[in-house]
Amino acid sequence: MSTVTVPPVAPSHREDAMQIFRAFKGIGCDAGAIVDILAHRDATQRSLIEQEYESAYGHELRKRLRSELNGHLKKAVLLWMHEPGERDSFILKKSLRGAVKDQKAVTEIICSRTPSQIGQLKRAYFTNVGTNLEDHVEDELSGDHKKLLLAFLTTSRYEGPEYDEQLVEEDAKALHKAAKKFSLSEKTFIQVFSERSRAHLCAVSDAYKSMFKKTLEKTIRDETHRNFEYALKTILRCAESQPRFYAKALRKAMKGLGTDDTALVRIVVTRAEIDMQYIKVEYRKKYGKTLNDAVHSDTSGHYRAFLLALLGPNN
């Protein structure tokens, strides 16, 4: 459920484009005006504003935003201007590039998406990057982490609520057996976690705890490491409760001395029009304060105003 508040009667996209153009004029940019408009327009409206801006003023709105804004606000606004599928492909392209890759972001985007969303993502990636996502993952990642992500990208999974109880029990036993060996049988974990539906994995997690008196997540934590561990936990946590997964990720981004603004921006922007209302409920339930208050404490200026606008009312 979206938290973005759009005016009941929004100004025309022509009026919005004109107000944004005026915000760019003179010395410095009226960042507050940019926030007031773009943070309160849905994806369709933002696309129309872009089209009108280019038609009326002869240059791309995103390029102008890139030159006029700065810091974390610029990163957040530019990410917000993408269509959802295009946005995911942009994040993955950037995260897979260079000597230092953001493998956590790659894992989060791929392993938290449903099979239908994966399909949209792969099409958008090919359109915008000119390369198959699987090929890029193959070239840039390594080890069991790469094997799991490739399997997750290429395997069809059922998205409904039904599951086979006998297969659930067999999978729980197979995972337990794989974890009991001298070294973990990664192949079994990759197969189960890439091939089974979310409903099935939830049932496996419950069965595993009932049968072996230990949670499946603890087994993952004990027996795997680094990026492979994070990928398995992401798949499992999103199967159990995607809003809870993101609430925990947001808490981690803001916990401690410094804020991980890259993760904060990525999560708020990508989830604002999808399920942010549910994430906010989970955040308050788990941490005893509203997500809005947490963001307010960890950010400042127009950057803070933009994120809070996307989060909606403080509840």
Image: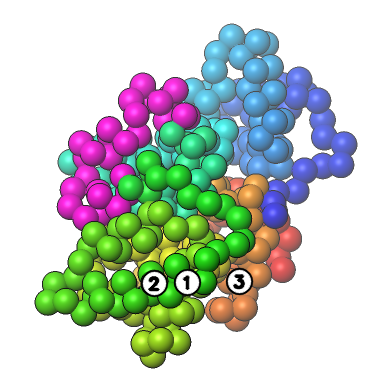
Residue appearing at x 41%, y 80% in the figure:
208
The answer to whether residue 221 shows anywhere in this view is: no
First in residue order: circle 2 vs circle 3: 2
First in residue order: circle 1 vs circle 3: 1
Which numbered mark, 2 or 3, is in the foreground of this view? 2
Look at the numbered disc 3 and give the secondary structure of its residue.
helix
Instruction: Identify the residue at the far right of this view.
Output: 9
Tell me whether circle 1 and circle 2 mark residues in contact (CB < 8 Å): yes
Residue 138 vertical position relative to residue 206 in the rendered view, above or below: above
Residue corresponding to mark 3: 282
The N terminus, quarter of image: bottom right
Q: Quadrant of residue 254?
A: bottom left
Residue appearing at x 25%, y 49% in the figure:
147
Magenta stretch mostly in which secondary structure? helix
Residue corresponding to mark 1: 166
Q: Position of residue 172 (x, y in %)?
A: 38, 74
Residue corresponding to mark 2: 170
* Residue type marked 2: Glu
Residue 24 relative to residue 172: left or right: right
Residue appearing at x 46%, y 80% in the figure:
207
- Span colored in magenta: 123-150
